[in-house]
Image (spheres, helix red, strand yellow):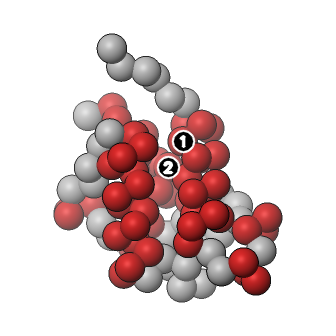
Amino acid sequence: MTIAVTEGEILLKLTEYVGRNLLEEADGSSQLTESTPLLQLGILNSRNTGRLLAYIDEEFGVPVPPTRITGKHFADLGSVTALVVQLLAE
């Protein structure tokens, strides 16, 4: 049985995960929004991107193919959310 998850729920889970696990406390995770530039601010470096990929696979049950691990898909939480939605639909 598949449990449907909404785009808003995916965004919330991703925001909470990044805020709790990938930000330094001094960065202020309360300031994290859908359009916070994760790559530009250095929040997503190679190690953190790997952690986020593992979280997406574990939480949503979809592995991210290597061809989708691009700056376009990981620029901000909105683009990561859109990627997860797209992978869930495939």
**Residue 22 sits above or below residue 87 on the image:** below
Q: Is residue 16 left or right of residue 67?
A: right
Quarter in which the C terminus is drawn: top left
Q: Residue 10 bears which disc, if any? A: 1
Dividing the picture into quarters, in which one does residue 78 lie?
Answer: bottom right
Q: Is residue 32 left or right of residue 21?
A: right
Quick one: SS at disc 2?
Answer: helix
**Residue 87 sits above or below residue 56 on the image:** above
Quick one: SS at disc 1?
Answer: helix
The answer to whether the residue labelled 2 contacts the one labelled 1, judged by CB atoms less than 8 Å apart, is yes
Residue beneath the point at 33% across and 14% down = 1
Amino acid marked by disc 1: Ile
Front residue of 87/56: it is 56
Residue beneath the point at 34% across and 70% down = 50
Horizontal and vertical percent position of residue 76: 55, 65
Horizontal and vertical percent position of residue 52: 42, 63
Q: Is residue 89 left or right of residue 19?
A: left
Where does label 2 land, which residue?
81
Residue beneath the point at 43% across and 21% down = 3
Q: Callout 2 environment at 10 Å: few (<14), some (14 to 19), or many (20+)? A: many
Whether residue 11 is visible, yes or no, is: yes
Front residue of 86/47: it is 47
Say which label, 2 or 1, has the lower sequence index.
1
Whether residue 40 is visible, yes or no, is: no
The CA span between labels 2 and 1 is 6 Å
Residue beneath the point at 50% across and 29% down = 5
Q: Is residue 49 left or right of residue 62?
A: right
Horizontal and vertical percent position of residue 82: 46, 48
Horizontal and vertical percent position of residue 45: 43, 82
Amino acid marked by disc 2: Thr
Q: Residue 50 bears which disc, if any? A: none
